[in-house]
Structures are given as structure tokens and as C-alpha cells.
Image (cartoon, helix red, strand yellow):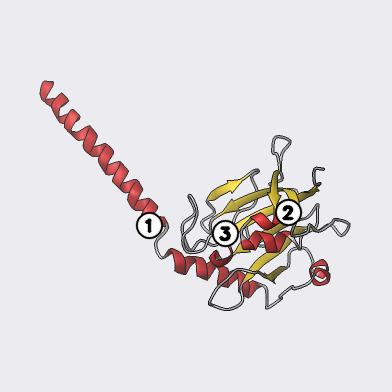
Amino acid sequence: MKRIRKILCFLLPLTALFLASCEEVQEAGKYDNWQARNEAFIDSIARETGGLIIDSEEKVSAVEVGRLFAIPTTAGTMSGDQYVYCKKITANPDGRRPLYTESVSAYYYGTLITGDRFDGNFIGYSALDQGTLNATDKAPTEFDVPSEISVSGVIAGWTAALQLMKTGERWMVYLPYQSAYGTSGSGSIPGYSALAFDIILDDIVADEE
């Protein structure tokens, strides 16, 4: 019996070490060829736009719900023009667009191309949800609270999208890494990560006097 206990005492730490090693390998494997996979994801989204580039408020108002389109961003890069890819889930012709200098309240759900959530204030659609998305599915609950966001104080892709959204609208927004957190990443977001956001523009925040 003592011998069995000694064997168990020896094996248990080895088992824990083995399991920890397996988890590390799986985590590393998740991000294998990460840059190439993220670029391929964005390329597939770009192809779905059919070359539809929106560069004005009038043009974005005319885009129908469910249609993918591209908008230019101010992200600095040596590889030419950069675009963010968007799809309206809900349109609101009577809403108002925020200015660059304003702040908004918004619900959002951010995921990597794997569908893994990295941030958000409600459970929305992920990068894996494609095709026509139902506005009533995965909606914020009464327990979810929108966040206050400065239009000029976020990553380039968000700034570009927010200025074309109207209050009351819900969009899927796909950001190439150049318009997100670049080659370095941020927190749990690895470098070269394309990001997908389900964004609901709740309201424009009034300035406090």
C-alpha cells in the first residue's frame, strides 16, 4: 500500500505537468500561421463586398441591410489604402451620425477570427456568424449596459465606422489588423489580429456644461 502511495505521489505531479504542457501546445497551435490566417479572413470578407466602396454619408444611407461594403480608414500603412468592412444588421434612416469630436453610448461584442470573445458588454454575433443576421437574435438584455466611447479615442477602424453609423443602427464591422491593434496586439489580442465587432449605436452622449 505504501508503495502504491509513493507511485501515486510521483505520478500526480507528472500528470499535472503533462496536462499543462498540452494546454500550452493547444494555445500555441490556435495561433499558428496567425498573420496569414487573419489576412486570408479579411481577403474573403473583401471579396464578398464585390468592390463596393462607400466614401460618403449619402452612399452609406443607400446600402441595404445585409450587404457587405468597404469604407476607407485613416490607418497609417505602407501597403496602400486601408478599408474596414461593414454590414448593416439594422438600419435607422431617422438616426443621427456622431461627429469625430463627440462621444457615443454603444453596445459591442468583439471577437477574433476564431470566434473567441476578447471584449464586449453584451453577447452578440461573432466573426464566425456569416450571411444574413437577424436583428432580434443575440440582442442586449435588460441587464446589459452600453459603454460610453469617444469617437476620436478608439482604434482607427472604430472611428471610421462610428462616423457613418446612425443612432439606432446595428452593424457587423470587420477590421484588418492595420486598422485595429497592428503587429503588436493589445492585452489578450495577439499581433496581426483581424477583429470582428457587433456594434449597436445606442445614442450620442450630450456634452456636460
Distance between the alpha carbons at the discs numbered 1 and 2: 33 Å
Residue 144 position within the rendered picture, expressed as x and y whole percent measured from the top left? 69, 38
Kindly indicate whether the residue at mark 3 contacts the one at mark 2 (C-beta within 8 angstroms).
Answer: no
Residue 134, which numbered label?
Answer: 2
Residue 29, which numbered label?
Answer: 1
Which amino acid type corresponds to the residue marked 3 in the rendered image? Answer: Leu
Distance between the alpha carbons at the discs numbered 1 and 3: 19 Å
Residue 195, which numbered label?
Answer: 3
Distance between the alpha carbons at the discs numbered 2 and 3: 21 Å
Front residue of this view, candidates 162 and 9: 162
Vertical comparison of 137 with 40: above or below: above
Vertical comparison of 111 with 123: above or below: below
Front residue of this view, candidates 66 and 186: 186
Earlier-in-chain disc, 2 versus 3: 2
| Residue that sits furthest to the right in the current view | 94
Neighbourhood count class around disc 1 (C-alpha, 10 Å): few under 14, some 14–19, many 20 upward: few
Residue 160 position within the rendered picture, expressed as x and y whole percent measured from the top left? 69, 64
Which amino acid type corresponds to the residue marked 1 in the rendered image? Answer: Gly
Front residue of this view, candidates 112 and 161: 161
